[in-house]
Image (spheres, helix red, strand yellow):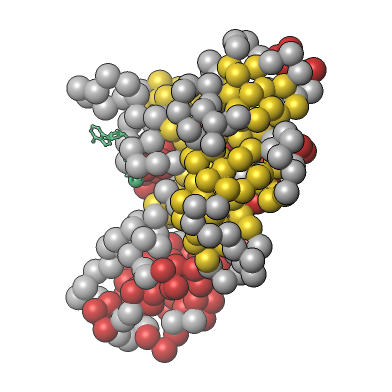
């Protein structure tokens, strides 16, 4: 087992203007499950491949444990990778696929057999050891790919979207299995996904990337409760956090035809005359009060059984001169109707405030 350190590590592909991964600084603890998440093209796979040795590091360094591996070839880094497409050998059985790396390394047949069997038991695929991959379901193939990584007993597991070939239901059960397995094995793991729900449910910590830049790295709870900037605020959470540009006043901000009170501390920290207010759908209360609440015209009601979400627009304009779209979670037993006007109160301790210029969280 080992720690991982990205020390201002950058990767710039030939012929591109900006680095795909830009001065990444990240320390991953021994045995930690770290998830790299971000939209398509944000540099997740590149960051993982830099750690694996499949991509050059143009500036900075990468360490595994107390070894600087920046210049080491992949085979000398003691890592095992699980990719999206599994890449199983079709002509080999499950057992041969799982034991292949050990065979190449010249390990004795009896040891290989034992390790493959142990891993197969762990993954509940021991009945399929003699089958070829084509005779397996997607979920079983995924477990074979995991097994192939496990038998190598590496210091680090690297996984790049390993669940994306599975259907929605299987993804959910497999992600729980992988997270539980990782905790049992205690092997430091870096896991790439573009799915923020997967990130939040699996990771000890989650690192959010955008345009090759690390935005924030923290526990799922901390990302949710204290997003460091507007990007993280809008990326983490589903439905997404409502974000509205608001005009600063002496004691708060004006948005959508209502005043929202703000602390003196926040008002003095603001660096312009507008700020961005963030409030999650579940941080809104429907009230009969018209004072200090946001009037919203209901455009759509989405009933999910356990919850209902109301989509609409604020009655008044925001600081950028448009009517902000807002989503609110409401009691599913008494949902409003299309065309209704709701009065929404933001729970004061669940209001997020960001700079209107830099997008950074205000204290
Ligand atoms: N071999 C390459 N040559 C040039 N540019 C590349 C190369 N590989 C990736 N890029 C660019 O680097 C950026 C980051 O790519 P990367 O594959 O790391 O993104 P990602 O976050 O994994 O995205 P996805 O979720 O779509 O897999 C993208 O803009 C991509 O176009
Ligand atoms: Mg990728």
Does 252 sit above or below residue 119?
above
Answer yes or no: is residue 126 visible.
yes
x%, y% of residue 120? 47, 78
Does 137 sit above or below residue 248?
below
Does 114 sit above or below residue 101?
below
Answer yes or no: is residue 196 visible.
no
x%, y% of residue 148? 40, 66
Q: Which residue extends farthest right? A: 264
Residue drawn at (66%, 62%) of the image = 331
Q: Indicate which quadrant contains ligand 1.
A: top left
Q: Which residue extends farthest bottom? A: 127
- 282 sits left or right of 244 in the view: right
Question: Residue 60: which quarter of the image?
Answer: top left
Residue drawn at (65%, 51%) of the image = 282
x%, y% of residue 262? 75, 25
- 189 sits left or right of 144 in the view: right
Does 333 sit above or below residue 285?
below
Pick the front one: 231 or 311: 311
Residue drawn at (44%, 85%) of the image = 126
- 262 sits left or right of 194 in the view: right
x%, y% of residue 91? 19, 75
Residue drawn at (33%, 74%) of the image = 138
Total count of labels: 0
- Quarter occupied by the C terminus: top right
Pick the front one: 313 or 236: 313
């Amino acid at each position: 087992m080992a720690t991982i350190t990205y020390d201002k590590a950058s990767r710039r592909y030939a012929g591109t203007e900006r680095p795909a991964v830009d001065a990444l600084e990240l320390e991953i603890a021994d045995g930690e499950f770290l998830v790299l998440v971000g939209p398509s093209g944000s540099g997740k796979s590149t960051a993982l491949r830099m750690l694996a040795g499949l991509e050059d590091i143009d500036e900075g360094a990468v360490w595994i444990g107390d070894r600087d591996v920046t210049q080491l070839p992949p085979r000398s880094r003691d890592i095992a990778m699980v990719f999206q497409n599994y890449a199983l050998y079709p002509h080999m059985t499950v057992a041969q696929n799982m034991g292949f790396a050990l065979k190449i390394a010249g390990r004795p047949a009896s040891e290989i057999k034992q390790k493959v069997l142990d891993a197969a038991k762990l993954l509940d695929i021991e009945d399929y050891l003699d089958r070829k991959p084509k005779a397996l379901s997607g979920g079983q193939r995924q477990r074979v790919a995991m097994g192939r990584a496990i038998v190598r007993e590496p210091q680090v597991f690297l996984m790049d979207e390993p669940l994306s070939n599975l259907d929605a239901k299987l993804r959910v059960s497999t992600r729980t299995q992988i997270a539980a397995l990782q905790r049992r094995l205690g092997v430091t793991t870096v896991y790439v996904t573009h799915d923020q729900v997967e990130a939040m449910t699996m990771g000890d910590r989650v690192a959010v990337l955008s345009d090759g830049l690390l935005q924030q790295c923290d526990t799922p709870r901390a990302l949710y409760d204290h997003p460091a900037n507007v990007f993280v605020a809008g990326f983490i959470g589903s439905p997404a956090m409502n974000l509205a540009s608001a005009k600063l006043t002496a004691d708060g901000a004006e948005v959508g035809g209502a005043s929202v009170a703000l602390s003196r501390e926040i008002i003095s920290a603001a660096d312009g005359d507008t700020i961005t207010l963030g409030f999650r759908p579940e941080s809104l209360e429907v009230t009969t009060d018209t004072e200090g609440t946001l009037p919203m015209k209901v455009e759509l009601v989405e009933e999910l059984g356990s919850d209902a979400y109301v989509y609409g627009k604020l009655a008044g304009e925001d600081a950028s001169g448009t009517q902000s779209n807002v989503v609110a979670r409401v009691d599913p037993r008494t949902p409003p109707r299309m065309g209704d006007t709701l009065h929404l109160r933001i729970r004061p301790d669940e209001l997020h405030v960001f700079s209107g210029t830099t997008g950074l969280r205000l204290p």
